[in-house]
Image (cartoon, helix red, strand yellow):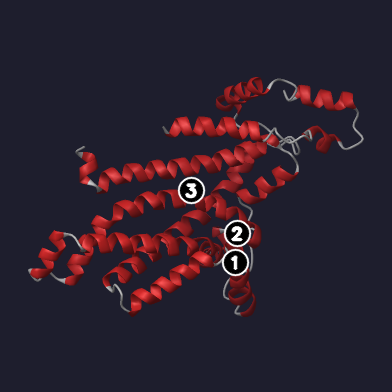
Amino acid sequence: MSLVVLAVVSALLFALTRLTPLSPARIVLGADATAEQVHEFERERGLDRSLPDQYVAWVAALPRSGFGASYITGRSIDAELRESLPVTFELVSAAFVLALAGAILLGLVAALTEDRWPDHLIRVLSMTALSVPGFWLALILIRVFAVRLGWVPPNGIVPLAEGWRLHVASLLLPAVSIALYYIGALCRLMRAAVIEVLGQDYVRTARALGLRRSLMARYALKNALPPLVSVAGMSFGYMFGWAIIIELVFNIPGLSRALLTAITQRDYPMIQATVLVITTMFILSNLAADLLQRLINPRLRHA
């Protein structure tokens, strides 16, 4: 099913990028280009053929030559993705780890202190995290921690070759800007799942038999993970969309720069490749979540 979804998305993406009335030939050749020059440009790149023919030719060329070359720069798209994708992937992975750790910790505390002041405080904080726009939060974090306090670099990501401390410090603010929203969302889900587990008969029996609270919390956490894993898998894919905005604010040379430049220049191959890579990441994260569900949920393994 993941392969079917990927095929459908690639076809829709291919069609949607060609709905714009302006030909990329006008951007490459300039406004003064003649009709013959535009036609020759489109003929060389197959843009004069029907949409189904263009799509079939594009798919057939993927195993041999990858995503091809950019219409604007003529550079290999695969080479550009090899430079920008690892940057975005590292940023999203760091944000995902922060979101997951924060959500599990806060959700567990909120569930164990249900309807007491820690629970109410965490509820307020999570709703605040859900309400704050990521780009605005990024600007505030830059102003406070980078400009005023000078604790971290204000933009870009320091290469790992210059030291892991500087590298992690430069990665911290953009990762927090992405993770905060998902901490608020996953925290509420985690709280609800743990409270549901704590209300089960076997937990009440364990409590009546005097089982330690820390041990009960560990069992409750294990049985509350399945719904969190499903939503976390989708969240990891969604974070690539958030990363586009955050990379723009922090001037990070990831997928956002390549995608936004390609959109403004009508660079069809670059748009298709970048969006398809993001879509693939989303599909793979959901597939990984489904497979992980079978590992942590015995009922699925024995079904």
Which residue lies under the disc numbered 1? 138
Instruction: Residue 246: give its label.
Output: 2
Contact check, label 1 and label 2, Cβ < 8 Å = yes
- The answer to whether 91 appears left or right of 67 in the picture is left
Q: What's the distance in space between the residues labelled 3 and 2, CA to CA?
A: 15 Å
Looking at the image, residue 42 lies above or below residue 143: above
Give the amino acid type for the residue marked by disc 3 in the picture: Gly
Examine the image and state in which quarter residue 140 appears: bottom right
In this rendered view, identify the residue nearer to me: 286 or 164.
286
Crowding around mark 3 (Cα neighbors within 10 Å: few <14, some 14 to 19, many 20+) is many
Q: Residue at x 55, y 26 (%)?
A: 63
Q: Residue furthest left?
A: 209
User: Which of pointers 3 and 2 lies earlier in the amino acid sequence?
Assistant: 3
- The answer to whether 27 appears left or right of 131 in the picture is right
Q: Secondary structure at mark 1?
A: helix
Q: Position of residue 274 (x, y in %)?
A: 60, 41
Q: Secondary structure at mark 3?
A: helix
Rendered-image quadrant of the N terminus: top left
Instruction: Residue 237: give its label.
Output: 3
User: Which of pointers 1 and 2 lies earlier in the amino acid sequence?
Assistant: 1
